[in-house]
Image (cartoon, helix red, strand yellow):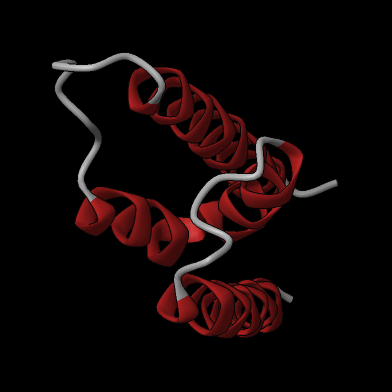
Amino acid sequence: MNPLLSAIVAFFILMNLLAILILYLDKMRSQKEGMERVSEGLLFFLAAFFGSLGVFFGMFAFRHKTRKWYFLLGIPLLFVENMCALYVLYLIMH
C-alpha cells in the first residue's frame, strides 16, 4: 500500500476516534450542571474534517444531539462529503 494512502487512512481513523471521544465527553458534561460544554461548531468542524463517521456513531451510541435536526441532516451529508473527498484523494494518488 502507498505510504501516503496509509497515512490518509490512519488520519481518517484518528479523526473519527477523536470525534467519538469528544462527543462522549460532551455527553458526560451535559449531565453535570455548570460544566463547560463542547460547542456544536466544534462537533461540525470535526465532522467536516473527516470525523463525520465518529460523530454519527457517537450521536447514537451515547444518545446525544439526536433531537437536533441539523445534526440528523448535516452529519450524514458531511459523511458523504468526506467519502467523496477521500475518493478524490485516492484517484489523485493512483
- Is 48 placed above or below 56 here? below
Q: State left or right for residue 41 relative to residue 55.
A: left
- Is 70 placed above or below 1 here? below
Q: Measuring from the top left, give residue 79's x and y in whole percent.
A: 62, 73
Q: Residue furthest right?
A: 1
Q: Measuring from the top left, give residue 50's x and y in whole percent.
A: 51, 58
Q: Measuring from the top left, give residue 16's x and y in whole percent.
A: 60, 41
| Picture residue at 14% right of the left edge, 16% below the top | 34
Q: State left or right for residue 39 relative to residue 13.
A: left
How many numbered markers are drawn?
A: 0
The foreground one among 77 and 68 is 68
Q: State left or right for residue 20 relative to residue 53.
A: left
Q: Measuring from the top left, give residue 42's x and y in whole percent.
A: 25, 49
User: In which quadrant is the C terminus drawn?
Assistant: bottom right
- Is 76 placed above or below 39 here? below
| Picture residue at 25% right of the left edge, 36% below the top | 38
- Is 86 placed above or below 52 here? below
Q: Please tell me in which quadrant of the rendered image residue 53 appears.
A: bottom right
Q: Residue furthest front?
A: 33
| Picture residue at 63% right of the left edge, 71% below the top | 86
The foreground one among 71 and 80 is 71
| Picture residue at 53% right of the left edge, 66% below the top | 67
